[in-house]
């Protein structure tokens, strides 16, 4: 792809960035389709959509959507590879620079809250990942279970345990890894609180009434199964998939592997579990997103004010 610079864009590619976030099922993708692709490109901020082969369970943008407006950070890793928040920041930085060279504004969109936090403020001073320790912890958690891992975290880092949900095994595992690598709890490492790279983002949070969001999540799960989620799982198993793969820790995938390991493989029960976990996850997402400052909270069912706000930011 050939990139050409546009003198109308600011010199700092990070000065103008749109953050568009919200809980699972709120309607982010539908809104992105209405953006002008000549002015905007999307940087994916979903921790599962970065993986190849994980399309239906992650509610990845369709090929038609990807043709309508360019997306970055989709299908860039294999699901057996680890993709860390540090990887996200590095890849997102490069995407923003490329989008800037095209004379456009990057729209960072997704639901992985800590991606937005560290993209805005930078990474903590905690030590980088240690592949050997991470692999050992992954194996140990697979053998002993999530409850064991969270109990251990409560012993070695009770402050981090209070901040991390028991089912968020990525962050639980990372906190344990930091403790074993450094001998210090993750919560003892400071996190920057000043915007990095001179970033001055337009931060838009999408929200809906609770009952409407629950209805949308229910419909989304039903759609996943009707579009072939079971066949996608079978295809992954043919590739040698296991519950230890980092990409399969996401909702929509881990429930299948938990069911297979427990011997309870009823599809209706798996669907109910995915729906329940999605509702709980949406609640945790909103709690985290509400900690951001200067958020413009808007209802995506009324698109015009949101699109007008983004357009005005682009022109300013």
Image (cartoon, helix red, strand yellow):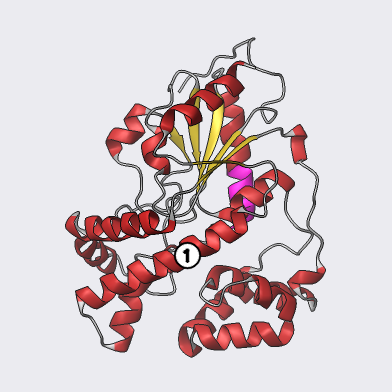
Corner quadrant of residue 291? bottom right
How many dots with numbers? 1
Residue drawn at (19%, 58%), measured in percent from left and top? 228
**Is residue 141 shown left or right of residue 162?**
left
Magenta stretch: includes residue 261: no
Q: Which of 93 and 269 is in front in this view?
A: 269
**Which quadrant, please, contains the N terminus?**
top left
Residue drawn at (51%, 75%), measured in percent from left and top? 167
Measured along the vertical axis of the image, is residue 149 above or below residue 287?
below
Is residue 50 visible in the rendered structure shown here?
yes
**Image position, residue 117 (x, y; %):** 66, 51
Corner quadrant of residue 301? top left
Is residue 250 visible in the rendered structure shown here?
no
**Is residue 35 shown left or right of residue 295?**
left
**Is residue 291 shown left or right of residue 60?**
right
Measured along the vertical axis of the image, is residue 235 above or below residue 303?
below
Farthest-out residue, top? 7
Secondary structure under the numbered disc 1 in the rendered image = helix
Task: Report the predominant secondary structure element of the magenta stretch.
Answer: helix
Determine crowd level at label 1: few under 14, some 14-19, many 20+ residues with C-alpha closer than 10 A: some
**Which quadrant, please, contains the C terminus?**
top right
Q: Which of 2 and 120 is in front in this view?
A: 120
**Image position, residue 4 (x, y; %):** 55, 14
Which residue corresponds to mark 1?
A: 281
Residue drawn at (41%, 49%), measured in percent from left and top? 26
**Image position, residue 222 (x, y; %):** 23, 60
Measured along the vertical axis of the image, is residue 233 above or below residue 242?
above
Magenta part of the protein: which range? Answer: 84-91
**Image position, residue 176 (x, y; %):** 66, 77
Residue drawn at (29%, 61%), measured in percent from left and top? 218
Magenta stretch: includes residue 86: yes
């Amino acid at each position: 792809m050939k990139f050409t610079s546009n003198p109308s864009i600011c010199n700092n590619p990070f000065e103008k960035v749109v953050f568009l976030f919200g809980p699972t099922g709120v309607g982010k993708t539908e809104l992105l389709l209405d953006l002008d692709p000549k002015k905007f490109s999307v940087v994916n901020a979903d921790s599962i959509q970065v993986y190849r082969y994980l399309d239906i369970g992650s509610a990845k943008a369709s090929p038609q959507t990807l043709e309508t407006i360019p997306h970055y950070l989709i299908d860039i890793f294999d699901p057996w590879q680890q993709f860390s928040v540090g990887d996200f920041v590095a890849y997102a930085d490069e995407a923003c620079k490329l989008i800037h060279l095209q004379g456009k504004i990057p729209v960072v969109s997704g639901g992985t809250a800590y991606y937005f936090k560290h993209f805005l403020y930078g990474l903590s001073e905690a030590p980088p990942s240690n592949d050997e320790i991470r692999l050992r912890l992954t194996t140990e958690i697979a053998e002993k279970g999530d409850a064991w891992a969270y109990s251990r975290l409560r012993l070695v880092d009770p402050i981090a345990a209070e901040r991390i949900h028991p089912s968020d095994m990525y962050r639980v595992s990372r906190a344990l890894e930091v403790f074993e690598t450094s001998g210090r709890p993750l919560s003892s490492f400071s996190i920057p609180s000043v915007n990095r790279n001179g970033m001055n983002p337009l931060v838009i949070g999408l929200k809906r009434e609770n009952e409407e969001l629950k209805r949308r999540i229910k419909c989304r799960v039903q759609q996943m199964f009707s579009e072939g989620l079971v066949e996608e799982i079978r295809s992954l198993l043919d590739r040698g998939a296991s519950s230890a793969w980092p990409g399969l820790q996401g909702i929509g995938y881990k429930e299948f592997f938990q069911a297979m390991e427990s011997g309870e493989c009823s599809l209706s029960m798996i669907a109910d579990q995915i729906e329940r976990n999605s509702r709980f996850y949406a609640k945790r997402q909103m709690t985290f997103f509400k900690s951001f400052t200067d958020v413009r909270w808007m209802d995506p069912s009324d698109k015009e004010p949101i699109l007008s706000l983004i357009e005005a930011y682009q022109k300013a």
